[in-house]
Amino acid sequence: MTYIAEPAQLVLWLRGGLQQLAVWAGLPAVWGDWLGTVMEIFSLFAFCAVLVMVLVYAERKIAGHMQDRLGPMRVGWHGVLQVVADTIKLIFKESEVPAQADRCVYRAAPYVVFLAGFLALLALPLDKGVLPVHLNVGVIYILAAGTPGVVGILMAGWGSGNKYSLLGGLRSAAQMISYEVPLVLSLLGIVMLGRSLDLQQLVAAQTVPFVLYQPVAFIVFLIAAVAETNRNPFDIPEAESELTAGFHTEYGGIRFAYFFLAEYVKMFVFSALAATLFLGGWRGPVLPGWCWFFIKTGGMLFLFFWFRWTFPRLRADQLMNLGWKILTPLAFLNIIGTALMLMWL
Amino acid sequence: MSTIIGFYLLSALAFVSGLVVVTTRNLLHAVLALAVSSLAVAGLMLTLAAEFLALVLILVYIGAVVVIGVFAVMLTGHFDQPLVPASNELKPLGAATALAFFLLISGVLLIQPPARELPLFEMTVEQIGRLLLTEFVLPFELVSVLLLAAMVGAIVVSKGKED
């Protein structure tokens, strides 16, 4: 099975085939490249949809077993078709616009949030030489691609014209910009060790997984990533007992589905980023690289699910204290420590 | 060819959304249009192969400026009354500022005309980092101090007098 062990060659082979197809049809070879790019975008979109379905099923099953329940069992074998049924329901459900909504802003918000997560996905190195877009500033790209998501959530909160949505949106945005600071700072140590912002080179530099050199940064990153994705124990933006459902209270049908997609895609992006930067990415013995990538990312995702059923929700003030008074100074100390280590070792 | 098409499309987008920023009466729409405008400018930088600058522009302008702008709109009580007058009484001053800025830009372009062929830089991040820590370390630090002072000032002003 050598052709699966080298996905980089498969991608190159497909690209070459498309160029030849374009030439054969009497068009410039560049058109083949464009066609390839369009196909890559569509296949990534399909990947997103399938990925989210798998994650939702896994989360419901894991949650069920952690609470001594079985989770979904009715539709299909052990409930595997439950998510498919839910997706069909969401697609065909009417998605109305509330009368008091700011219509344009309300309609655009879910797509802005989803696009932010989706764009970040483009730069993740799945295997040696396999990533949809190669950038020599991959780390900054992933962080920058996520930022319009905050604007999207604020748009949803404002556009709904509902006080719960507005409060949820404000809380969410405040939380996301607060935790972005320790998140970015925690990655600086990695960049200093790997001497690059290129995700491929950072993986290649990890003869020993960076988590062993950067345990503090790893913990800071993990906590900040959970807060960035608005998940338990940092889910006050959508605390149902206070805010019904926060910024997406007024959303239903396919628009709600896009928020849902975005949340899980973002979780996947952060898990994959942790796996890539701290756990050695596609490096590993015996199995092909993409297997290792998905095993490590899957482990990180399991941690996310585990947190949700382990920790109670934080209060808003505790959340801000943790972010600004504990995580940010820790991240700064980590950078200083890393610099000293690099100077003397 | 595709670079030129991209340049005109992105310029048009930046220009139109910039116009929306200053003409719309809805404050929130103005802030969101500013986000679109910054995205278009970031796209322009990408066509010039300045990836790092483009990403920093997105991080700073959309991640910080626009988000803070939306916060300001929401916290200053425009939730019920989002419509505000789109112009003020400072038209002569505005015209003077615009003229001064135009003269400044044309002056710069006259002194140093844009080059037709620029050498392509590889690894711009490294070069920017090196320059920031050697040649431009003093201006960089001065700007940091200025920003810090502005931040402290903003906190003092907004906190008001304690009684």
Image: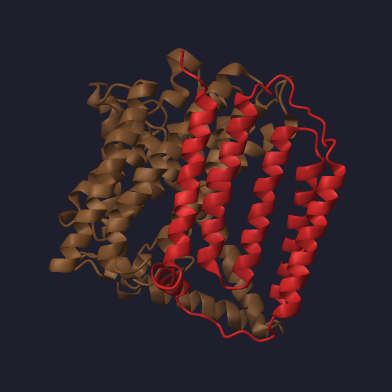
Question: Residue shown at 71%/73% (left/top)?
Answer: B108
Question: Residue shown at 48%/27% (left/top)?
Answer: A171
**Residue A29 in the image, given as x and y percentages of width and height:** 64, 82
Q: Quadrant of residue B45?
A: bottom right
Task: Report the number of discs.
Answer: 0
**Residue B125 in the image, given as x and y percentages of width and height:** 44, 70
Identify the colour of chain A in the image. Answer: brown
Q: Is residue A324 visible?
A: yes
Name the residue nearer the viewer: A197 or A44: A197
Task: Describe residue A281's horizontal placement relative to residue B140 as left or right.
Answer: left
**Residue A251 in the image, given as x and y percentages of width and height:** 60, 26
Quarter the N terminus of chain B occupies: bottom right
Task: Describe residue B59's horizontal placement relative to residue A319 as left or right.
Answer: right
**Residue B6 in the image, given as x and y percentages of width and height:** 71, 68
Name the residue nearer the viewer: A124 or A235: A235
Identify the colour of chain B in the image. Answer: red
Task: Describe residue A286's horizontal placement relative to residue B2 as left or right.
Answer: left
Q: Is residue A85 visible?
A: no
